[in-house]
Image: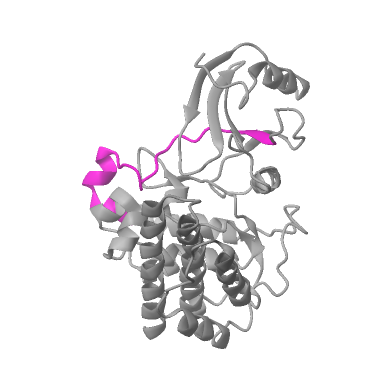
Amino acid sequence: MQQIDPELVDFAVLAGWMDRQGLPGGPFEDVTPLSGGTQNVLVRFRRGGRDYVLRRGPRHLRARTNDVLRREARVLSALDGTDVPAPRVIAACPDETVLNGAVFYLMTPIEGFNATVALPDLHRGDADVRHAMGLNAARALSALGAVDHEAVGLVGFGKPEGFLERQVGRWMSELESYGALDGYPGPDIPGLDKVASWLDGNRPATWRPGVMHGDYHLANLMFAPDGPDVAAIVDWEMCTIGDPLLDLGWLLATWPAGDAESAMLAGPLGEAGGLPSPGELVAAYGERPEAAAGRDLSSITWYAVLASFKLGIVLEGTHARAFAGKAPKETGDLLHSITLGLFRRAQAFIAS
């Protein structure tokens, strides 16, 4: 068994907890830490003839980490029985006293790859496969958009009332809060006020709430190794009940488009090209009537602008923390350049 710091995962404690859940017993085998685009700890293992992935927060738990893990486990459990491609929760421990202060859950392993990290030969060498991967990214999202959040037990999981109305003010306040960081001179983001005003003046009049992933882009998808299918949507830290069209807008805001900023977000898949156009993504999403019903896909530009606006402000937070010595300067500068690119993209969406 590969050694894992017992402060992160105490396998003796884990064994006792699994036994109490009625899961198969025996020694832990094939223990392997997994890497990914998250600070959370992921460990794959086999026990009693069954494979698992354990997910818990990082070594130094942040204030909301355990609550976020509880929310993840709840939404993934609710999605069991749907056709949304996502890990399935096998068992969850919301009690943080069991594993050294950390909430954790066990989920099914995903056999797949992250296309923003590397492409297998099949996907790298076939533009038709890459085109289908893009369409399937939108179709996987439409499967999530089709879920009736009340029917799957997610009443009260979020606050959908007034969701769209509070977005611009919420994120402008977030940007303003960065001013409390020592050394940050304030946001230098051309187009900021113009984009905020346009969003307030063009908000869709009606929308239908549903389950949102909250951070839907290519880096949070795992693709099947033998074809273009989405094996799983991962990293559900931002999930809530809101307007699912914002997830589709997020996909468009981060979609590879030939500029340096989107290339950094899309990695090898973006570099390889052959991907569908934004219009094709929207059409693929709309193929599923249950996802499109009650949602105005003709307003998708507004959602793409909001996604660019929101993500740009989120990334600017690291730029601000870098001024205060709380993040590396190189990282802050890089993310600031992506923020500027997102606001350029937002203004291009508006102009189109």
Image location (x, y in percent) of residue 309: 49, 72
Residue 90 against residue 166 in the figure, above or below: above
Total numbered circles: 0
Residue 286 visible in the picture: no
Image location (x, y in percent) of residue 204: 58, 82
Q: State the residue at coordinates (62%, 24%).
A: 9
**149 or 57, which lies in front?**
57
Quadrant in which the C terminus is drawn: bottom left
Judged from this view, the residue extending furthest toward the top is: 27
Q: State the residue at coordinates (40%, 78%).
A: 190
Residue 138 visible in the picture: yes
Image location (x, y in percent) of residue 221: 45, 48
**179 or 166, which lies in front?**
179
Residue 16 against residue 109 in the figure, above or below: above
- Magenta segment range? 103-132
Relative placement, left or right, of 74 versus 321 is right
Q: State the residue at coordinates (30%, 65%).
A: 257
Judged from this view, the residue extending furthest toward the front is: 183
